[in-house]
Image (cartoon, coloured by chain):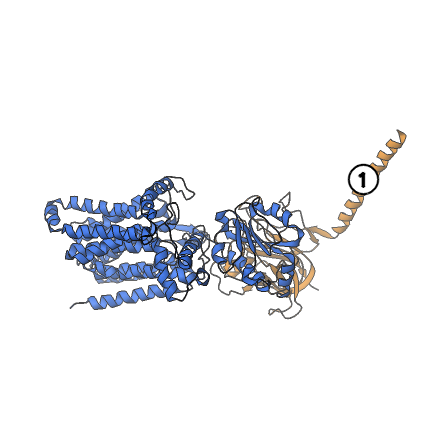
Chain colours: A blue, B orange
Amino acid sequence: MNRSPVYIALLLLVAAGALFFRLTELDSRPMHNDEANQAYRAGILLDEGLYEYDPVEHHGPTLYYFTLPIAWLSGKFTFAQTTEWTYRLLPVLFGVGIILLLPLLADGLGWPATIAAGVLTAVSPAMVYYSRFYIQETLLVFFTFAAVASGWRYWRTRKIGPALACGIALGLMHATKETCVIAYAAMGGAILCLAFIHRSSLRGNLQMLNWRHVAAGVGIAAGVSVVLFSSFFTHWRGVLDSVLTYTVYLDRGTGNSEHIYPSFLHYLKMLAYTREGPLVWSEGLILALAAVGLVAACMRKAPAAMHQGLLRLLAIYTVLLTCAYSVISYKTPWCALSFLHAMILLAGVGSVVLFQWLRVPLARIVLCIVLAAATWNLFGQARRANFRYRADVRNPYAYVHTTTDYLKLVQRIHDIRAIHPDGYDMLIQVIAPADEAWPLPWYTREYTAVGYWPELRTADIGQPPVVVASLDFDEQLAERLGEGYLAEYYGLRPSLQVAVYIRRDLWDEFMKTRI
Amino acid sequence: MKAKRLLTLSLTAFVVTLVMVATATAADDNAGKEELKIELPKPMFIGTPKKLKTPNLEPAKKDPKRPPFFAPKGTVLLSRGKPVTGSDPEPVIGEMDQITDGDKEGVEGSYVEFGPGRQYVQIDLQQKAKINAIVLWHYHCNARVYHDVVIQTAGDPDFILDVKTVYNNDHDNSSGLGVGKDKEYIEDFQGRLMPVDGVEGRYLRFYSNGSTADELNHYTEIEVFGAAAK
């Protein structure tokens, strides 16, 4: 009996659950510095139709271009009209898309492992957290998986369609984030290793390849990349910069950055066990099951309903990818997503292999109960990470995150605007270096008169209604503004605050509304 | 020359008199009082963080060590082991009874975590008492300032009868309990000692509204000192 429709229905159910989970309270987390920055750039594209690739910061163009349809379809035609939903919906859709791509591997992994991988993707705290985070990472994981899955489909069918799909995915990877080269290298390395392992059948396999299909795939990959980096043929410099950028990223990756964690085990420790006060975080279930999957891939005989070649390819790819990201000193938690997803695929295999290894029915029942309980625990962690502790310093995924206290600063600006005769045209002076000014450009997107000065000495300060400033300038600014201002202080990021100065007459007026 | 010596002598006498008067006044102030002995936990950080401010934050003290506090003789710790309830009946971290169990350490397992926004804990002293001092530890693992710290006493558990506010640092009335004039402060291992002028009450509520670190509310320990009301 062909059970595929049942499995597909099951996977759709998992995907629907993942979608619901990812959409819940999507706008409740304060905008992270990086999210605000990316949203601002997408806003320029929305407002002015302008995008030019920046080889130093911000990564590739797919994030911005793919945001446009969501904005238009939701009736948002200017940056000021957009909301957190406009942006975060994009990674949500790609995050769920990662689950929907899984059937492409079902004839190699077997349906039970495919479903298991889908469930783990749906509840992994890191996968859920960054599927609600407006940065490139989830898109990169989606395109990477699309490249692997369509590559596998091509290997199985030898048809031009999957070859072109694989090429498009490879091109989109490049147009998403510079770190795609790590995945390219891991894919290439895995294919070479597998070719070496199966060298006896290499000649036959190569003869079966249609080199025109390969060339078409490579061509379309390059084409997709050129179209996007050239901003649809309007900024050719972007194509050159997409290559030259690697000098910048090489420098950053080898130590010239504030996000340097030289330990090889940094990511693995974070995923295996992180204890922050009484809060314990662990994706150890995925790591342990992936290890079982790895062992299964090393065995001579493939587990039932699985393709040993694909298992080995995934195993080598996962090991290479994990090692590559772990060797690089530049580390941010979201970078772990690429190899975590590869581990999830292996974990799906691992869970089924464990079941197959256990022959006694009672042992199988116990295994199912243990796996279900551990998966429920992952789900609980994901809920914790995405709701109550969404911006908490004890959440390992909320990396240098904007505090929830910052939302009170934003509310205070709105409070003063509500009583100011100029409304959204009220002047707001921001005197802070760039890293302390963000994410204010996002939160003041509806205001028309917001000025930014990185230094106090360059700022021309009169008697503005509101001044937002770095605490570095606090004493001098308090002196310059005099008694006519009240200062409030709000947390921006862990151990970092910013000051808000409110003109006393406006403060007194505001307080009348509070008593 | 003689006049100069006379002037020096007069000034010295004046200063000595001033010191004597001040000492006598202080001694008189503390007459009938004794130093309140407060057991302190281990400090989790040292010094005043430079980049931590709030609208009405008290200025940093030269000597961070709290001076001794003198309370009327017969003042005892009333709150130890007394029942605690709160606005969040099931805290995510910790149990309510930890707030009066005497464990004030700034480590895991010592504090109770409440949800976001305005929250309170309520202690029932199980008898009407004359309150002379309160010491409150929110969370002292790292430097932070809790917003809208308001402490009220009352004669009934619903806070309808004889409600008195003994501390309030909500400068903008964001918690809706009135504008407070008390200062905000940085949490540390010494806790916040709030002198109370013999206010009578059986129930105490301790409000807070998030901190500079996050929107959640934490309570490590509360100690209420006083004597049974006659």
Foreground pick, A95 / A318: A95
Vertically, is B3 above or below A139? above
Residue B167 spot, x, y in % from top left: 64, 59
Residue B206 quadrant: bottom right
Residue name at image x 30 percent, y 64 percent: A15
Q: Does residue B82 appear in the picture of this structure?
A: no
- The C terminus of chain A is located in which quarter? bottom right
* Category of crowding for the residue at label 1, using alpha-carbon neighbours closer than 10 angstroms: few (below 14), some (14–19), many (at least 20): few
| Residue B59 placement, left or right of B87 | right
Relative to residue A304, is residue A474 depicted above or below? above
**Does residue B192 show up?**
yes
Residue A63 drawn at (x, y percent): 36, 55
Instruction: Please identify the residue farthest to the right as the structure is shown.
Output: B2
Asked whether, in this view, residue A484 is left or right of residue A214, the answer is right
**Disc 1, SS:** helix
The image position of residue A44, as x and y in percent, is 42, 56
Q: Label 1: which residue?
A: B15
